[in-house]
Amino acid sequence: MEVSTIAIVFVAALHTGFFVLESVLWTSPKVQRIFGNTEEEAQATRVLALNQGFYNLGAAALLIWFHTTNNTAGVMGVLLFLAGMGLVGAITANWRIILFQSVPAIAAFVFVYTM
């Protein structure tokens, strides 16, 4: 298996995990601790997190679809989108988002670009 494929699948798996955290487990005590939310904050933002989670799942699905159909431009476009959204998240929410979203997407982009 190529390094670029492993990187793409890793990024897609991360975003599927983000979907689970945001859309399924958002109000659980463990996820509240991860995101630094109180019970009240988690309940108040539940619908927003659900929406955000589905965006992550959609990005993961597009990434896998483009990869399996050999659409390199699509893969690279989604990876750049995810890197950019990670930067926005780091600026607006928590700087660590850049580590979990932007860095893996940029690394995968580099592997795809150089392969």
Image (cartoon, rainbow, N blue to C red):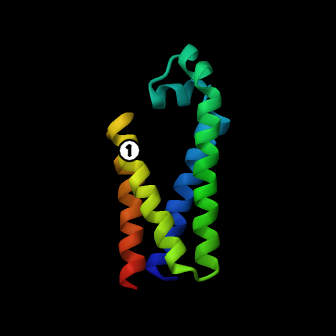
**Quarter of the rendering occupied by the C terminus:** bottom left
Q: Which residue lies furthest to the top in this view?
A: 40
Residue 93 is situated, as x and y percent measured from the top left of the image, at 39, 34
Q: At 49% across and 22% down in the image, what residue appears?
A: 37
Q: At 55% across and 28% down in the image, what residue appears?
A: 30
As rendered, which of 60 and 32 lies closer to the eye?
Answer: 60
**Residue 58 in the figure: left or right of residue 32:** right
**Residue 61 in the figure: left or right of residue 34:** right
Residue 70 is situated, as x and y percent measured from the top left of the image, at 59, 83
Q: Is mark 1 on a helix, strand or loop?
A: helix
Question: Which residue in the protein does label 1 denote?
Answer: 88
Indicate the quadrant where residue 112 lies: bottom left
**Residue 101 in the figure: left or right of residue 47:** left
The amino acid sitting under disc 1 is Val
Q: At 64% across and 62% down in the image, what residue appears?
A: 61
Residue 17 visible to an observer of this rendering: yes
Indicate the quadrant where residue 60 lies: bottom right
Indicate the quadrant where residue 39 lies: top right
Residue 94 visible to an observer of this rendering: no
